[in-house]
Image (spheres, helix red, strand yellow):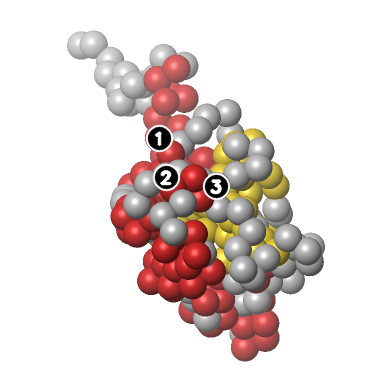
Amino acid sequence: MKIISTFHDYYDSIQGYGFDPTVIYLRKTKEIENHYRQKTYKIQLRGLYNNKYDYEIRYSGVVFFCAKVYPFVCFRHSVNCKLRYFYNPVVLLRYIERAYSKDINSHRRWKFSGGNHKKNIKEFFAIPNNFEVNIKLHEKFDSPVFVIHYNYFLCNNYTIVNPVLKDMNFQTVYDPYSAFQEIDMFLSGVMQSAENKMITISDKVRKQKHGFDKTSFRPKMKSS
């Protein structure tokens, strides 16, 4: 797989070990604002203000990576704006119970207005992984990787196509070699098959639109 991009991601160096030049990943980032609110991408932990480490919840959402979904929660430092991404519910729960221990122990419900934080975290990370639905979204955005964010401050959803995964600490989910291999196989296999299917369907529809059918190109037989 040959990557054409204006930025460097954490798995790009794998190209140095050789790649298939016939598989091209045109990695151009774009942001699309969604005009709907989907609760699936929003974890119910509203009201988490600065904890004892000066972090506050900033985003939640899902990384769609080669037809698989990876929910995440992101905290931002209130001073240096450093981001912390969590893809593992166990690690996230451990962090929240340590960072917000005083609020949890004192039962200050306004801090956890979503209700039971353990239950909410478990449900959020149990987002169904529907392969067929995911493939349709990949086709829609024409990319092997995209992210749907929920912004707690703007209260909206938006999609980033071809995000910079190293900035999202996605290397904790896939190491560089595995990430490169997954994208390569997805582009050359699943996306290529979907594209060929669309071309076949388009040809069929175009013929029907112009009045052609299966007998249109058969030679006419002379009557005796």
Q: Earlier in the sequence, mark 3 or mark 2?
A: 3
Q: Quadrant of the C terminus?
A: top left
What is the crowding at mark 2: few (fewer than 14 residues within 10 Å), some, or many (at least 20)?
A: some
Residue at image location 63% in from the left, 49% down from the top:
160
Q: Amino acid at mark 1?
A: Ile
Residue at image location 58% in from the left, 28% down from the top:
35
Give the residue at the far bottom of this rendering.
Answer: 17
Q: CA distance from mark 2 to mark 1?
A: 46 Å
**Rendered location of residue 52, percent (x, y):** 62, 68
Looking at this view, is 39 or 7 the one in front? Answer: 39
Is label 3 in contact with label 1 (beta carbons under 8 Å)? no
Instruction: Tell me the tag on residue 47.
Output: 3
Residue 201 in sight in this render: yes
In the picture of the structure, the residue carrying the numbered disc 1 is: 201
Q: CA distance from mark 3 to mark 2?
A: 9 Å
In the picture of the structure, the residue carrying the numbered disc 2 is: 114
Secondary structure under badge 3?
Answer: loop
Looking at this view, is 34 or 197 the one in front? Answer: 34
Q: Amino acid at mark 2?
A: Gly
**Rendered location of residue 50, percent (x, y):** 64, 59
**Rendered location of residue 51, percent (x, y):** 60, 63
What is the crowding at mark 3: few (fewer than 14 residues within 10 Å), some, or many (at least 20)?
A: some
